[in-house]
C-alpha cells in the first residue's frame, strides 16, 4: 500500500470541513483560504478550491459578494449562509464524534480493557 495515497485520502476527507471552518470565521477571499490551509500544513491548490466553493455555493451553504480591487479585477469574497452554518454544525458534531472514536481506538489498551475481554 502507498502511504502517500492513504495520507492524501485522509486529507481529502476533511478538506470541506476545514475550508468551511476558515469561512465560518468571517468573510474570506479564496487566496486567504489557501494561505490559512498552508499555514495549517494542509496544502490546497486553487484548482481544487474553486470547484469546491462553487459546489458549496450551489448548495446554498455559501454566498459571496464582489469587491472592487485597486490592483486588478474585482474580488469575490465568500461568507456562510444560515443554511451553511447549520450544515457546519452537523459536520462539526460528526468530526468530534469521529475524532473521539479515533482517539479511543489509537490509545494503548489498559489492563482494565484487557480484563473486559
Image: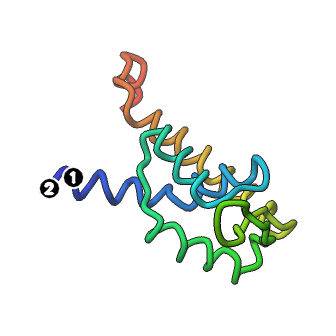
Query: Depth check: 62 or 76 in front?
Result: 76
Q: Secondary structure at mark 2?
A: loop
Q: Which mark is residue 2?
A: 2
Q: Is residue 104 above or below residue 29?
A: above
Q: Are marks 1 and 2 in contact (CB under 8 Å)?
A: yes
Question: Exactly how many numbered labels are in the figure?
Answer: 2
In the displayed structure image, the side of residue 57 where residue 17 appears, left or right: left
Query: Depth check: 71 or 18 in front?
Result: 71
Which quarter shows the C terminus? Answer: top left
Furthest toward the top, the residue is 111
Q: Secondary structure at mark 1?
A: helix
Query: Depth check: 67 or 56 in front?
Result: 67
On the image, the x and y values in percent for residue 51 come to 53, 77
Q: Is residue 58 above or below residue 34?
A: below
Image-quadrant location for residue 50:
bottom right
On the image, the x and y values in percent for residue 69 come to 73, 63
Image-quadrant location for residue 96:
top right
In the displayed structure image, the side of residue 39 where residue 6 appears, left or right: left
> Which residue is identified by label 1?
4
Q: Crowdedness of circle 1 by 10 Å Cα count: few (<14), some, many (20+)?
A: few
Query: Depth check: 72 or 17 in front?
Result: 72
Q: Crowdedness of circle 2 by 10 Å Cα count: few (<14), some, many (20+)?
A: few
Which quarter shows the N terminus? Answer: bottom left
| Residue located 44% across and 71% down the image | 47
Amino acid at each position: 500500500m502507498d502511504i502517500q495515497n492513504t495520507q492524501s485520502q485522509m486529507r481529502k476527507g476533511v478538506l470541506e470541513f476545514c475550508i468551511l471552518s476558515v469561512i465560518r470565521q468571517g468573510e474570506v477571499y479564496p487566496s486567504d483560504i489557501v494561505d490559512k490551509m498552508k499555514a495549517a500544513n494542509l496544502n490546497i491548490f486553487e484548482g481544487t478550491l474553486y470547484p469546491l466553493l462553487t459546489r458549496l455555493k450551489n448548495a446554498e451553504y455559501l454566498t459571496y459578494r464582489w469587491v472592487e480591487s485597486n490592483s486588478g479585477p474585482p474580488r469575490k469574497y465568500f461568507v456562510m449562509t444560515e443554511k451553511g452554518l447549520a450544515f457546519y454544525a452537523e459536520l462539526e458534531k460528526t468530526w468530534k464524534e469521529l475524532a473521539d472514536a479515533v482517539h479511543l481506538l489509537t490509545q494503548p489498551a489498559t489492563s482494565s480493557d484487557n480484563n473486559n475481554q
